[in-house]
Amino acid sequence: MSSESKEDLVFKALAHKARRAMLDRLKEGPHTTGMLCEEFAQMDRCTVMQHLKVLEQAGLVVAEREGRERWNHLNSLPIKQIHDRWISEYATHALTILDRLQADLE
């Protein structure tokens, strides 16, 4: 197994626009791999499956087999964890600075 942290895997997965587009599709609901291949027809099936593998390794997609179909489900928890760790913390800091600036201007 790679020495990359789970957080690193999430950032890596989110770095590619095709994977972000796949996550946007999965926000609408679970899709089979075949459905995703149809929606991303500009890529061959192997490429779609490679992107899904990266998303799955990052924990952003959970795959479930039903007979011959592989259903891909969005798991948004890793994105929320990134938000809680990075985005919200920095947003709070930025808002504090803006509040101070507004108070100084008044």
Image: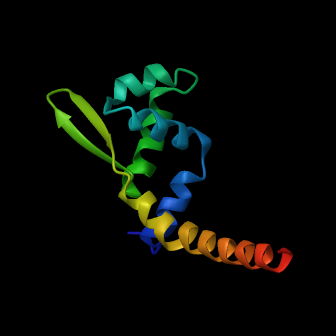
Quadrant for the N terminus in the image: bottom left
Q: In the image, is residue 78 above or below residue 49?
A: below
Locate residue 3, reporting x and y percent: 45, 75
> Which image quadrant: the C terminus?
bottom right
Q: What residue appears at the point 45 percent right and 19 percent down from the top-left corner?
A: 38
Picture residue at 42% right of the left edge, 27% below the top: 36
> Left or right of 21: which side holds 103?
right
Residue farthest left in this picture? 67
x, y percentage for residue 95?
66, 71
Decide: is 77 above or below 43.
below
Position of residue 5 relative to residue 17, above or below, is below
Q: Look at 60% across and 53% down and name the residue there.
A: 15
Residue 2 point in image, percent of width and height: 43, 70
Residue shown at the point (57%, 66%) measured from the top left: 87
Closest to the observer, 13 or 93 = 93
Q: Quadrant of residue 105?
A: bottom right
User: Which one is nearer the viewer's eye here, 104 or 59?
Assistant: 104
Residue placed most toward the observer, 26 or 55: 26
Q: Position of residue 46 (x, y in %)?
A: 46, 33
How many labels were placed on the picture? 0
Judging from the image, the colouring scheme is rainbow
Considering every residue shown, the one lying at the far front of the view is 106
